[in-house]
Image (cartoon, rainbow, N blue to C red):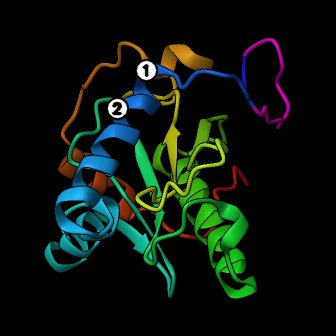
Amino acid sequence: MGCSNPHPHGQIWAQRSIPQEVQKKHKNQEDYWNKNNKSLLKDYIDLELRKNERIIVENETFVALIPYWAVWPYESMIVPKKQHQSILTLSNAEKKDFGSIIKTLTIKYDNLFGVSFPYSAGIHQAPTNSMSNEFWHFHMSFYPPLLRSAEVKKFMVGYEMFATPQRDITAEQATEKLRACSEIHYSKA
């Protein structure tokens, strides 16, 4: 995504060091695992599923929600209900569910403002550093560029999205609006 590149595309970043935001996720997941011997995100997902306040949509193996710590307007996260360190360990059924929930969420985004638009998304998963990283629980974050309407856009891509975010609405307000959107793709006709 990006104004200079108006077609779907992806990037894979690999480097020797771990970026600051990923480092925080790494440390918090590791600390929680060492204290509780279970996944931080698994416990968080179980709590969100019980409360059902910030769940946008779920299927058999994945959940899409607005995390309570979201700072970007309509920031959302897709997380597998079962802990996986990376997408490489998903079963065929989980891969189908992952694709299905991505499709459902992006259609809801299009329907939210009545226009198809680009978004930035990223998968965070365990580092490939030859360590077990058993505490990692991979997840995918979405950052749509529309703030309050189809006319109010803010494009941020790459590392800057994980640097200094803003929060215009609460996680619960964003969830309510996205939940109400149809799962049928928006059409101008």
Q: 83 and 102: which one is in front?
A: 83
Residue at 63 percent of width and 56 percent of height: 186
Give the side of residue 172 with respect to residue 189, left or right. left
Q: Position of residue 163 (x, y in %)?
A: 41, 15
| Residue situated in front as seen by the camera: 2 or 49 | 49
**Can residue 70 be found in the magenta stretch?**
no
Q: Position of residue 179 (x, y in %)?
A: 36, 64
- The range drawn in magenta is 3-12
The local crowd at label 2, few if under 14, some if 14 to 19, many if 20 or more residues have their Cα within 10 Å, is few
**55 versus 156 height, above or below:** below
Q: Which mark is residue 20?
A: 1
Residue 142 visible to an observer of this rendering: yes
What is the total number of numbered labels drawn onto the structure image?
Answer: 2
> What residue is disc 2 on?
24
- Asked if labels 2 and 1 touch by Cβ distance under 8 angstroms, the answer is yes
Q: Is residue 11 magenta-colored?
A: yes
Q: Is residue 74 visible?
A: no
Residue 130 pos. (x, y %)? 66, 48
Label 1 packing within 10 angstroms: few (<14), some (14-19), many (20+): few
Residue at screen point 60% across, 54% down: 106
Quadrant housing the C terminus: bottom right
User: Which residue is most to the front?
Assistant: 131
Residue at disc 1, secondary structure:
helix
The image quarter containing residue 28 is top left
Q: Amino acid at mark 2?
A: Lys
- Report which quarter residue 162 is drawn in: top left
